[in-house]
Image (tube, grey):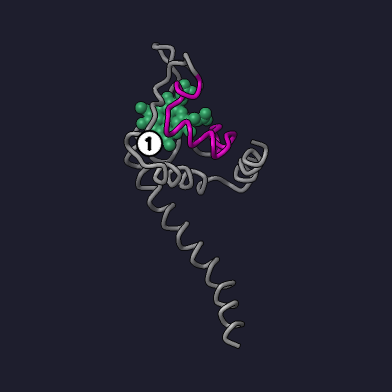
Amino acid sequence: MGFVLLLLGYLVGWPLLQARVSASSIETGKKLYAQYCAACHGTNLEGQPNWQTRKEDAKLPAPPHDATGHTWHHSDDQLFKITKLGISDVVPDYESDMIGFGNKMSDDQIRMVIEFIKSTWPQRQRDYQEQRNRVE
Ligand code: HEC
């Protein structure tokens, strides 16, 4: 009987615990996003105006992170690398305003920001991105 209760507790409790942990890391990710990303990518993840047109300095404006952008075309791994190291590090000889945040945020914090961004996507974008994770 004790064992059955323990097993039940494990089966029911673990997903609940997981859900709580991930809800709180998304909350933290949201705060980190406001602090480090919103200035360029927009408070509501809307990006900068005319984000597909290069500026006078030949660099691209910041794209949206919502469903209208293409952040969801990248796997978790790519998003992590871009955020930690910056685009110029991932694509050599490419000039970009997207610098790395590896010196400002821990790896866990970077993952939380990405989880927050992902949590705002509609199901279609989430499914597509989930597929990218499996391909890579
Ligand atoms: C100083 C402005 C600025 C800040 C702050 C900034 N970004 Fe960016 N980000 C950019 C620009 C500009 C690009 C597009 C660069 C390019 O393609 O040349 C970009 C691109 C990206 C991309 C690639 C998107 C895609 O669709 O290819 C990701 C992911 C990203 N940023 C995440 C973040 C995260 C997460 C933060 C906060 C931790 C952040 N950025 C903060 C300017 C910024």
Residue at (43, 16) in percent of width and height = 95
Mark 1 near ligand 1 (CB under 8 Å)? yes
Instruction: Report the magenta residues as a range.
Output: 67-91
**Could one spot residue 50 in this view of the protein?**
no
Please give left or right for residue 21 compared with residue 11 in the image.
left
* Image coords of residue 128 (percent x, y): 65, 41
Q: Is residue 123 above or below residue 55?
A: below
Q: Is residue 56 above or below residue 88?
A: above
The answer to which of 124 and 11 lies nearer the viewer is 11
Residue at (49, 66) in percent of width and height = 17
Residue at (55, 66) in percent of width and height = 15
- Asked if residue 2 is among those painted magenta in the image, a careful observer would answer no
Helix, strand or loop for disc 1: loop
Q: Is residue 73 above or below residue 118?
A: above
The answer to which of 56 and 32 lies nearer the viewer is 32
- Prevalent SS, magenta region: helix
Q: Quadrant of residue 129?
A: top right
- Total label count? 1
The residue where tag 1 is placed is 37
The answer to which of 35 and 9 lies nearer the viewer is 9
* Image coords of residue 109 (percent x, y): 39, 45
